Image: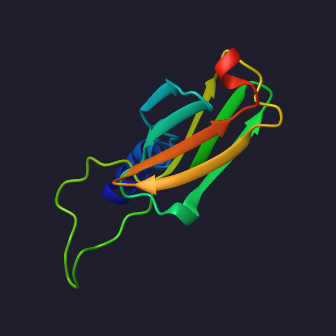
Amino acid sequence: MAVDRARRMQGIFLPAARRSQEAIWQPAVDVYRTQDGWLVKFELAGVRPEDIRVNVHENQLSVSGSRRDWCLEKGCRQIRMEISYSRFERSIELPATLRGARVVTEHRHGLLLVRLETEGASNE
C-alpha cells in the first residue's frame, strides 16, 4: 500500500518537476541606438559563448541557447539552487529593418553584446 502511495505521489510531482527543469528563461536585455546601428546587451552570466545562437530576421533579433550547471570542486553537493540552468530564448523587435545588417558579437563580463551595424544608421 505504501508503494502504491509513493507511485501516485511520483505521478503527481515528477512530471511537474521535469517541466520546470525544461522551462525556458528569458535573459534581461538593454537596447541602445548607436551611430552605426544598434547595440543590444543580454545578461548571460555563466553561459559559454559556444552555447549561444544569434539570429536576425527582418526587424527581429533573437538569441537562444542554454546555461549548464557545473560544480566548483570534486565532491560538492547541491544544497540550494536558484539559478536557472536550462534553455533560454529572447527576441527583441527593433524599430528598423535589420536586413543586410552586419552582426558583431562579443562576450564580456557575463554579458553578450550584439552590435547590429546598418547602412545609413545615422540618418534614420
Seen in the image, is 53 located left or right of residue 84? Answer: right
The image position of residue 86, as x and y in percent, is: 48, 52
Q: Quadrant of residue 103?
A: top right
Q: Which sits in the foreground, 118 or 108?
A: 118
Q: Nearer the viewer, residue 14 or 96?
A: 96
Q: Is 4 on the left-hand or right-hand side of 75?
A: right
Residue 89: % across, % down = 57, 40
Residue located 69% across and 16% down the image: 123
In the image, residue 44 lies at what x, y percent?
A: 42, 48
- Which residue appears at 50% of the width and 41% of the height? 23
53 up-or-down from 76: above or below: above
In the picture, measured across the screen, residue 70 lies left or right of residue 123, that is left
- Closer-to-camera residue (25/50): 50
Residue 67: x and y in percent read 45, 56
Total label count? Answer: 0
Residue 35 placement: quadrant: top right
Q: What quarter of the picture does the N terminus occupy?
A: bottom left
Compared to residue 75, the image places residue 7 above or below, namely: above
> Is 68 placed left or right of 73 in the picture?
right
Q: Is residue 47 visible?
A: yes
Residue at 47%, 63% (x, y): give it.
48
The one of 37 and 66 positioned closer to us in this rendering: 37
Name the image colouring.
Answer: rainbow
What quarter of the picture does the C terminus occupy?
top right
> Residue drawn at (65%, 21%), measured in percent from left and top?
122
* Residue 85: quadrant of the picture: bottom left
Residue 66 appears anywhere in the view: no
Judge whether 107 appears above or below 37 on screen. Answer: below
